[in-house]
Image (cartoon, rainbow, N blue to C red):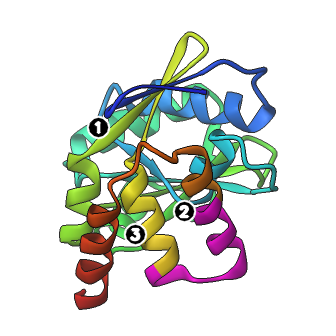
Amino acid sequence: MKFISANLIEINKELSDLDEFCLDFVKILRKYSKYVIISGYVSILLGRSRASEDIDILIPKIDIGKFKLLLQELRENEFYCLNAEYDEAIYEYLVEKTAVRFAREDTVVPNIELKFAKNRIDALTLSKPLAVKLNKEELIISHLEMQIAFKEEVLKSPKDMEDARHIRNIAKGHLDESLIETYKRMLHEL
């Protein structure tokens, strides 16, 4: 792993099935919306060895027309929604601030947990992405300071604290500690 700049990390590794699954989904998603990958998969992508059954992805609210096109292409590529079958129902879940899950046909895991941005923290997360060049592909993740702050201030489970510790260790010298504290205050206020 190499930190190229404040906005780019380069990783060369053998791709796992989870990496391939994520890349396949994101290749479609990015045609219709900007996105940012958040939570546990970020730690896994950055080298933490732990299991995960889902990949959390945050997108801005998009209109239903564009969303239907996204769903159509996902279906054409053998993805389905676990929450609902009909486009309008899936969209309504997202509008009501409920995440929806997508998996490959005939499977349940791994899955993508997709959610619309719902507050100013989500908007901030989308506005400050970090690109990861993964071999010849690209993924967009939440910047590391927000990842750490959210895991340490909001989630706080042992798994999340280990994720935060891992990110701190691999990104030592590349983190803005005062920004982490600012995000923690913002999260606490929210």
Residue 159 belongs to the span the image colors magenta: yes
Which comes sooner in the sequence, label 2 or label 3? 2
Query: Based on the displayed image, in which of its 4 quarters is residue 89 positioned?
Result: bottom left
C-alpha span from label 3 to label 1: 19 Å
**Would residue 65 appear left or right of 75 to someone viewing this image?**
left
Magenta region: 153-165
Mark 2 vs 3: CB contact within 8 A = yes
Any part of residue 98 in sight: yes
**What crowding class fits label 3: few (fewer than 14 Cα within 10 Å), some (14-19), or many (20 or more)?**
some
- Residue drawn at (65%, 82%) of the image: 157
What amino acid type should be assigned to the residue bearing mark 1? Answer: Lys
What type of secondary structure mainly makes up the magenta span?
helix
- Residue 153, image x and y in percent? 44, 82
Q: Which residue is mark 2?
A: 84
> Closer to us: mark 3 or mark 1?
1
What amino acid type should be assigned to the residue bearing mark 3? Answer: Tyr
Mark 2 vs 1: CB contact within 8 A = no
Q: Which residue is mark 3?
A: 93
Observer-nearest of 190 and 106: 190
Where's the N terminus, which quadrant? top right
- Residue drawn at (60%, 45%) of the image: 170
Q: Which residue is mark 1?
A: 34
Observer-nearest of 118 and 131: 131
> Closer to us: mark 2 or mark 3?
3
Q: Secondary structure at mark 1?
A: loop
What amino acid type should be assigned to the residue bearing mark 2? Answer: Ala
Q: Secondary structure at mark 3?
A: helix
